[in-house]
Amino acid sequence: MRPARRLARRRLAICVACTLASAAPAASAADASAPVYRDRIIAAQALAPLPPDEDEVVDGDGLPRSFRLELNAAYTERGDEHFGEQGLAAGGFWETANWGSLSLDATVFHSDRDRFADDSGWGGAVTLWQRNLFVDGGWRLDNGLGVINTPSSQLQRNQYRFFLPSVAMAGLSTQWTRDASGLSVYGAVGRAGLYNGTRVVGFDVADGHVGAFGAQWQGASGWTHAVSALSTDGRIVPDDVGEAGLIDRPSQAAHWASAWQSDRDAVQLNLLGSHDGGGNATGAWIDASARRGRYRHHYGLFSLDPGLTWGASPINQDVRGGYYRLAYQYGRWSWNTGIDDIRSISGAGFDGQYATAFARYQASSVFGYGASLSLRHADDDTYAAQLFADRRGDWGQTRFQFDHAGGDGGVGRSWQASIDQALPLREGRRLSVSLGYGEWGERNETSAGVAIRTTTRTTTFSMYGGVELGDRVSVDGTARWTHGEGPAAMRGVDLNLGVNWRIAPRWSLTAALYQSQGSQRSPFALDPLIVDSPFLSLPRERSAFLTLRYERQAGRALPVIGGAPGSAVGSIDGSLFLDDNDDGVRAASEQAAPNVTVVLDGRYAVRTDSNGQFSFPRVSVGKHTIAVIPDNLPLPWAVRDDRGLQSIEVGVRRSQRVDIPATRQR
């Protein structure tokens, strides 16, 4: 048997060798006759234009322009109120050859709400922007007319620990910038006011005036200076139901900032003075940073007199002290720690220390975990701790989190366990879900001085996402179900749901449903320097909103990187949200940031809606920039520089999605 097998193997080997030997000349001949392969690149201008969509109306004459007209109707139940709103909105943009880019946003509406009882019930707002208007001398102009916010210099916005908010007004503003020299000058004047309307945004003009001016310029050896002044005739205070109200209280303030920056170090000095009915007040703070290898140091001193003001919104005041922060990031480790020593100048505010610590370890490319701790030492000591772990896998990104808080005074021991899941779905669909359970404790004293501890148990389930149902229908929204048991319990469903139906090429119908059971402040967020928002105790609200929109786009596309005139288009959709856990991913339990301005390519401006959403349809293919102007972002939330200006690549007939997080200093 073995000799026969060996003979068969030898015959097989001989056959294979003969076959290869006969095939080699043929392969050589084929290689000699085959042409050499060469890469061939077709220039973009030589590509044939893509055919239009079946239901797309194309008008390629002239520069880009857009126009939209909306009919709005809403019905709202808020607290004990029941009222309706009807409105008309118009807007659009127009790219001109000699006058820059023009953007328009206008609304007019009628409301039968009680707060309009003293007038006809009519309200509205109009905003016209002219951006990127170039004139002789290398100047670039940005001009605004209508309902706008006061402009500000970069040094005023570039604050590490303290914030100076802008002021909403009805008036005009202009900002002149010479990019080559770093010189920028602005001015604004108008009437103070407040945004009104519940579902249809309007503006209520007050009796007072607003005036602002400022300049920023570059000095020698890395120095930059800025000066600004602001005068207002009103102050924002809460009314009986926690909503914003404007009282007649004039104030004037001036701000000076000088900053020096090198490759590794930076320092900025701020001086602020104000005068109002309560007298004069001054403030000064200095922020510095140093980068040494893997470490980043932040430190500063501050002294802000009682009664210090800046415009209509409340700011930090009646504090004196200093702070230090140390951050480390290398490889898999990132951590930071810091301490504040704060004293009340008048003796009526916070006196004590505030310390924080945060650490995160990236165990692998898909798994990381960490913890944070906040300690507040004063007459009543308070602490808040957090443990978390997140993982990316086949089911998307998962985050487990456990919060614990407690202390003396009225704060009892509280804890909450939650899980956030961002699911990986195909393009056009997104979904995040959150599930949490916790116990919130309070300690109250009776008239006899006996301390009584109470506990509220709360279960929450939240969802955030959107889906495109074919080419014509899309759904976006958030939903949160809350069930509590105890003295501070809240029960019910919070809902913000929107459905958009593209009826025809230029016609669409949007329906929205909003329901809120009210607001509660989390016991796990500690910061002695946060100015408590006067609008925390919002009442229960339920509303339905309907919009019929006509929209027309026209004009050839401007040249962009990766595209040419007449090239195909895509779109940009996104949202702005308050990133409570600072992970850059919008969880279902995190809130949206409405009514904040987002600018495309420095030209076209839109505002986020009640769900924090914004959209730029029919954007030229190629690279674009998205910038956030935090004009109405609630303090102390801010958009970091690396997230406030983002570069986005738009593909052919593709919708590019971007979610922009706003964070708080920790």
Image: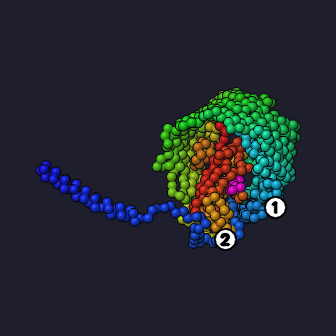
Label 2 crowd bin: few (<14), some (14–19), many (20+), radius 10 Å: some
The residue at the point 62 percent across, 37 percent down is: 524
- Give above or below for 391 relative to 300: below
| N-term mark: 2 or 1 | 2
Q: Which mark is residue 229?
A: none
Q: Position of residue 503 (x, y in %)?
A: 61, 69
Q: Is residue 580 visible?
A: yes
- List the residue tagged with mark 2: 60
Q: Dividing the picture into quarters, in which one does residue 475 lie?
A: bottom right
Residue 534 placement (x, y as % from top left): 74, 43
Q: Position of residue 466 (x, y in %)?
A: 57, 57
> Mark 2 is on which residue type?
Gly
Residue ID at (82%, 38%)? 272
Residue in front for this viewpoint, 621 or 78: 621
Residue 445 % position (x, y) = 67, 31
Task: Give yes or no for residue 597 being in the magenta stretch.
Answer: yes
Q: From the viewer's perspective, tell me whether residue 11 is left or right of residue 57.
A: left
Kind of residue at disc 1: Ser
Q: Quadrant of the C terminus?
A: top right
**Looking at the image, is 430 positioned above or below residue 325?**
below
Mark 2 or 1, closer to the camera: 2
Q: Nearer the viewer, residue 140 or 303?
A: 140
Q: Which residue matches tag 1?
A: 120
**Alpha-carbon neighbours of circle 1 within 10 Å: few (<14), some, or many (≥20)?**
few
Which residues are the magenta region? 595-602
